Image (cartoon, rainbow, N blue to C red):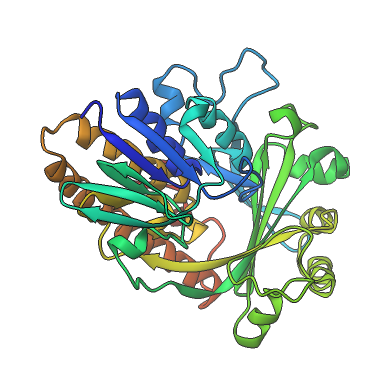
Amino acid sequence: MSGLRVGVVGGSIGGLTAAVLLHEMGCDVQVFERSAAALEGRGAGIVVLPMTERYFTESGTSLDSSGDAARQVALTLTYWSYIDREGTIIDAAATHNRFTSWNTLYRALLERLPPERYHLGRGAAGVVQSGQSAAVRFADGSTHPCDLVVGADGIGSTVRETVAPRTPTVYAGYVAWRGTVLERDLSPGSAEVFADAMVYQVLDRSHVLVYAIPGPGDSVIPGERALNFVWYRNARGADYDALMTDRHGVHRPATMPPGLVQPSFVQALHADASAQLAPQLAELVLACPEPFIQAIFDMTAHRFHLGRTILIGDAAAALRPHVAAGTAKACADGWALRDFLAGAGDLDEALAGWEAQQLALAQRVAAKSRAMGEAAQTTGTMVPGDPNWRFGLFSPGN
């Protein structure tokens, strides 16, 4: 399939992974990203599963390898710990999970793609298909002809309207409050709890977790790292609508960026942190003056492929984050695409095989992530130390 003209719509981690792999296979790849500037700040911290860093591992430049030991792309924490309201660790298991920041991973991938193949400010308005080809259509009426269009444009995908129109996106009934604080800005006693552990606290139909990620300059040196918190809080009906209306009265149903959350909601978050969280977690949340919010949704398209257009990552299936496999699944979609294209002489057969495999994977992981979310936020049956809560795309830790 060398020489295949591929248009990738969406230049986030999933789109970049697919683009880099297909470019290195010899395809003529062009990435079209709607943002006018290089992406940043998406999701703060992420869990690194083996598939997330497979590109770096197989290229001999693994995410924790660098000429500068202080500038690494991921870090490993030994323990998965649970803490109680009083601040006592009540369970700890050596899981050796790896973590990074979204920005760090994005930059590392972007460096592997020639800059002339990554086009900012080029949001797709749709896809036009005809026989054995497809074209990315832009708002100005221009098109880019392709042999294959890869829709990697997220949960609000424009490309999905070509492949699986009217796919329902269902709000799960809760949001994730997120933020980062520099490790050095915490008291030594609080910072010590997070030094070599991801820490969870289970609340009544809510839960919060904290883990370290690379800090400024991608440093993983203790004291220079950042600490990322994620607090899942229920919000429904009018409460949800109010929460997702920003300081200027604009309704943002998916993501509320830092600095736009209404001050009264930040104050309520801080008050609840003081009243409900372990002292170490409360100190961390209170130290973040401008948290942001991500609403949690369920969405899995009934198909990932139609004609010469496919969907990958969140454009194909948006997973609840509890299994920590969303980024890994997006990367896995790209790797599977590379493998099916490399091993087949017929493009349509390759795409059909790829779809069957990746759709089955997405459906299985989506079901698990929904069950985890319902246990934590609806039925209140999440149990500290439950080994079934381990991260993984294919299996725990993998």
Residue located 45% across and 51% down the image: 326
Q: Position of residue 157 (x, y in %)?
A: 43, 60
Asked if residue 154 is positioned above or below residue 112 in the image, the reply reads below
Specify the quadrant of the image occupied by residue 340: top left
Front in this rendered view, residue 390 or 251: 251
Specify the quadrant of the image occupied by residue 337: top left
Query: Is the C terminus in the top left, top right, bottom left or bottom right quadrant?
Result: top left
- Residue found farthest to the top: 67
Residue located 41% across and 46% down the image: 330
Q: How many marks?
A: 0
Front in this rendered view, residue 342 or 76: 342
Asked if residue 35 is positioned above or below residue 278 in the image, the reply reads above
Q: Position of residue 147 (x, y in %)?
A: 25, 41
Residue 282 placement, left or right of 213: right
Asked if residue 214 is positioned above or below residue 67 in the image, the reply reads below
- Residue found farthest to the bottom: 238
Residue located 59% across and 32% down the image: 107
Front in this rendered view, residue 207 or 40: 40
Front in this rendered view, residue 255 or 264: 255
Query: Is the N terminus in the top left, top right, bottom left or bottom right quadrant?
Result: top left
Q: Position of residue 95 (x, y in %)?
A: 52, 40
Tell me if residue 140 can be seen: yes
Tell me if residue 201 can be seen: no
Residue 222 placement, left or right of 201: right
Asked if residue 326 is positioned above or below residue 185 in the image, the reply reads below
Q: Position of residue 227 (x, y in %)?
A: 73, 44
